[in-house]
């Protein structure tokens, strides 16, 4: 078989398939990864083939470079799902392949580590049409054109990867979808959404048991002051997990996360408070603290 073939079938027990960009671009399917005696194995084979072909589409529509995996894998899973869903309406038998694809991606969404970015593709499949300002087609076409131009060496600028790694699900999937949207569409949201966000920006609010309200100019300030009010030493004792350490720590250590670098230092106790979290996660922390110490807080974000 010549190197210029579009699809190369090989045997392997390691992976199900891959797009090989060089020296001669090809899609490789590893049949050894499928159950040889399974009469239904055509479903994952076709699903894998479509997945890898979308990798090829992104490669050729871009500038011939490999794109950032944390973005590319969920987008490819998403694009394959949209394609299989559309073709299942026109071709008999593809509905079963589409359902197999959805099930497979849902299984990956329950994983941790690298498999998690594949799993986020399922969330995109289920929510882009209803939650995004752009159509599914616009997402796929725009990403294909831009995928290679996204700087793979500047991961810190793509905060989205911090939410996908090292585990899934993320705390606020809607926010992650919006972050994906900003990256794909050159950090430019539609005018309608910009106006909506500027006119009606939500804030973190803590309503105390006596009805008084704790609400500062920034969510970070509200969050920190609430912890100080509850007692930073007591919260430290709860050992609430955050960024591979705790919400309150006895020493500064941001690790590998740029988000964990944003910490408040309390000079009397010498403790540090993590500040940067998705809104829903801040709410859950404060609700947990309130329940643990019987504070009777009502925590809102609106």
Image: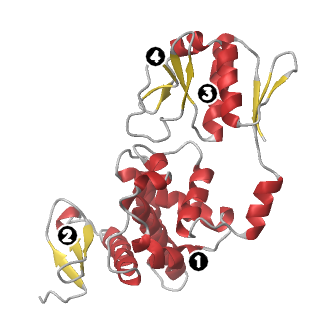
Count of numbered circles in the view: 4
Q: Earlier in the sequence, mark 2 or mark 1?
A: 2
Considering the numbered disc 4 on the image, is that residue within a helix, a strand or a loop? loop
Q: Earlier in the sequence, mark 4 or mark 1?
A: 1
CA distance separating discs 3 and 4: 18 Å
Compared with 86, 271 (above or below) is above
CA distance separating discs 1 and 3: 37 Å
Can you see residue 100?
A: no
Residue named by callout 3: 285
Q: Could you tell me which quadrant the N terminus lies in?
A: bottom left
Q: Do residues under tags 4 and 2 come within 8 Å of each other at their CB atoms?
A: no
Q: Quadrant of residue 186?
A: bottom right
Residue named by callout 4: 250
Residue named by callout 1: 138
Considering the numbered disc 3 on the image, is that residue within a helix, a strand or a loop? helix
CA distance separating discs 2 and 3: 47 Å
Q: Do residues under tags 2 and 1 come within 8 Å of each other at their CB atoms?
A: no
């Amino acid at each position: 078989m010549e190197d210029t073939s579009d699809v190369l079938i090989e045997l392997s027990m390691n992976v199900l398939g891959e797009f090989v960009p060089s020296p001669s671009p090809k899609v490789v399917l590893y049949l050894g990864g499928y159950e040889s005696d399974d009469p239904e194995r055509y479903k994952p084979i076709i699903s894998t083939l479509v997945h890898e072909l979308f990798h090829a589409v992104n490669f050729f529509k871009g500038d011939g470079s490999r794109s950032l995996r944390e973005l590319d894998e969920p987008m490819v899973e998403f694009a394959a799902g949209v394609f299989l869903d559309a073709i299942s309406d026109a071709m008999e038998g593809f509905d079963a392949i589409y359902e197999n694809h959805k099930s497979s991606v849902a299984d990956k969404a329950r994983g941790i580590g690298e498999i998690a970015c594949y799993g986020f593709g399922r969330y995109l499949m289920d929510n882009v049409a209803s939650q995004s300002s752009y159509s599914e087609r616009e997402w796929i076409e725009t990403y294909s054109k831009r995928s290679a131009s996204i700087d793979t060496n500047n991961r810190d600028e793509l905060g989205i990867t911090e939410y996908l790694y090292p585990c899934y699900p993320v705390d606020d999937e809607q926010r992650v979808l919006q972050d994906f949207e900003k990256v794909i569409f050159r950090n430019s949201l539609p005018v309608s959404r910009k106006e909506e966000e500027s006119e009606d920006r939500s804030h973190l609010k803590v309503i105390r048991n006596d009805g008084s309200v704790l609400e500062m100019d920034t969510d970070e300030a509200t969050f920190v002051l609430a912890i100080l009010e509850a007692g930073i030493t007591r919260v430290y004792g709860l050992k609430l997990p955050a960024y591979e350490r705790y919400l309150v720590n006895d020493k500064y250590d941001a690790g590998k996360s740029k988000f964990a670098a944003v910490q408040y230092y309390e000079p009397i106790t010498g403790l540090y408070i993590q500040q940067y979290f998705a809104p829903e996660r801040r709410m859950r922390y404060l609700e947990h603290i309130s329940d643990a110490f019987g504070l009777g807080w009502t925590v809102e974000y609106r």
